Amino acid sequence: MTAELWDPAGEGVMRLPSGRLVRGRGLRRPLPAGLGPTFAVHIIGGTGPTVPWESRLLRWPDFRLPSEKDTARAVLREAWKRATGERVEFACGGGRGRTGAALACLAVLDGVPADEAVAYVRRHYRRQAVETPWQRRYVSRFGES
């Protein structure tokens, strides 16, 4: 599927080193104006929102780590692959901690060294991304497996 991709200057859009564009956002905020995602990963502890586009639920309680690490890795890898030609969005409640950690893991998949991925996301997505020490540690270890 080839879709019109995100505007690189759009709200919450981050460019990975490969050129892939992904968007992060908070589910508690209104959907940004413009194009919607074609695929989304909802990073929450409970049930996901009902949306008109394809989505995956990644069970990840607020301020914590993914409940199922193998599932998380598979969902993140799927999203990274789909970002080559689709509008991929990551969204948690506030769009900072879990979304930032997931985006940092995508950066690792895209070739950013794991120990630099959090800084990459803070520079290219949001300064407040990845909120907890254990989220930072999860990202730093993401490249090991």
Image (cartoon, rainbow, N blue to C red):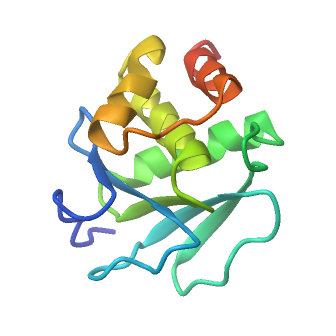
The single residue placed furthest to the front in the displayed view is 128
Q: Position of residue 104 (x, y in %)?
A: 47, 33
Determine whether 75 is above or below 9 in the image: above
Q: How many marks?
A: 0
As drawn, is 30 to the left or to the right of 135? left
Q: Position of residue 122 (x, y in %)?
A: 37, 34
Q: Position of residue 116 (x, y in %)?
A: 40, 16
As drawn, is 72 to the left or to the right of 9? right
Determine whether 142 is above or below 36 in the image: above
At x 46%, y 12%, the residue is 115
At x 70%, y 24%, the residue is 134
Which of the two residues, 143 or 74, is positioned nearer the viewer here? 143
Q: Looking at the rendering, in which quadrant would you find the N terminus?
A: bottom left
At x 36%, y 21%, the residue is 112
As drawn, is 8 to the left or to the right of 118? left
Q: Position of residue 145 (x, y in %)?
A: 65, 17
As drawn, is 145 to the left or to the right of 17? right
Q: Quadrant of residue 88?
A: bottom left
Determine whether 58 is above or below 125 in the image: below
